[in-house]
Amino acid sequence: MDGDVTRALEWAVEVAAWAPLPGSGETPLLWELLASTAAADVAVARVLEPHLDARAILHQAGLPVELEDVDADARSTWGVFAAEGPGMKVTAAERGSTWLLQGTKPWCSLAGQLTHALVTAHVQDTRRLFAVDLRQDAVSADAGPWFPRGLSQVVSAPVHFNSARAIPVGEAGWYLERPGFQWGGLAVAACWWGGAVGVARSLYEWARRGNPDQLAMSALGAVDTELNAARSVLREAAVGIDDPSPSASSEAMTALRARNLVAEVVDSTILRVGHARGPGPLVNDEAHARRVADLQLYVRQHHAAHDHAALGRALVASREASW
């Protein structure tokens, strides 16, 4: 991305005009777009994915991207702010015909540069989704703390809402309960996979140019095996979104399996390529070093053992192991 977030956001708006929606029959093409973007530049994919996710959520809710009540139009740039954190909470209250948001939301990526966001807020004992114009005076985005070596331009920091005007998107609880809630997480996994492909290409091209030893060829073979396995799982999940089978596992279990596998393949790819090539490309190949740093931070959105445990609990509750 070379530090130009504005240009990446403008490109995301252009892509959103023609990119397929998830569940439209072309979900594999959508994820291929995200993966190909990440293979070229992980940070650009990190900008593109939430914009496309917001567009999909608005479409699923039956709302156009052009939301006049929050001064949005076809050129607006969107994020999805749904994270929760200790000591931070956003509440929503209705005042007459207006909804107002109050509180602090953590992990709001690019909030200082986006025009709009979909934000989850607490309404009594449930959460509801709202569309918010981030440019209003009642919204302030922190600049940090943000000291990463990867995704340095994609700042993810708290945002404060002080009676910020918003409009509801869906009924209370709809965002978390809707069919398709897991689709955004799977799209992120497609980005992770694409980033791993970019890292793996460094090893592949190096092996083609030189005379690698048996250990390097073993690393390349292992990387190829794992990347293809993860791609198959992602494609199966994408096809299942477009044409769900009544006998298929739950959407949550499918998403957890795919994300768990892809995250492990990402970590393995970075490790195997690093062992095979040594420190050289991390110090003398700027694009490779940046890709590894970006991807290592991006994939930490995965909750590691916690997500494995979540899948285990879901599997026991389902009473139907597929194996």
Image (cartoon, rainbow, N blue to C red):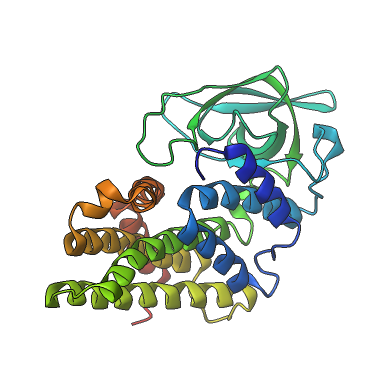
What residue appears at the point 41 percent right and 28 percent down from the top-left corner?
146
Task: Report which quarter residue 315 is drawn in.
Answer: bottom left
Residue furthest toward the left? 214
Query: Viewed as shown, does residue 193 lie left or right of 274?
Result: right
What residue appears at the point 35 percent right and 55 percent down from the top-left corner?
307
Q: Position of residue 308 (x, y in %)?
A: 32, 59
Quarter of the picture holding the C terminus = bottom left
Nearest the camera: 106 or 124? 106
Q: Position of residue 103 (x, y in %)?
A: 57, 22
- Determine whether 323 is above or below 160 in the image: below
Q: Position of residue 153 (x, y in %)?
A: 48, 36
What residue appears at the point 28 percent right and 73 percent down from the top-left corner?
209
Task: Report which quarter residue 21 is drawn in.
Answer: bottom right
Nearest the camera: 216 or 222? 216
Q: Give the total number of marks visible in the rendering.
A: 0
Nearest the camera: 104 or 92? 104
What residue appears at the point 47 percent right and 64 percent down from the top-left corner?
255
Task: Report which quarter residue 183 is drawn in.
Answer: bottom right
Q: Can residue 305 be seen by looking at this rendering?
A: yes
Q: Can residue 317 be seen by looking at this rendering?
A: no
- Determine whether 28 is above or below 179 in the image: below
Query: Viewed as shown, does residue 57 lie left or right of 38?
Result: right
Q: Position of residue 207 (x, y in %)?
A: 26, 73
Query: Viewed as shown, does residue 89 lie left or right of 214?
Result: right
- Determine whether 120 is above or below 270 in the image: above
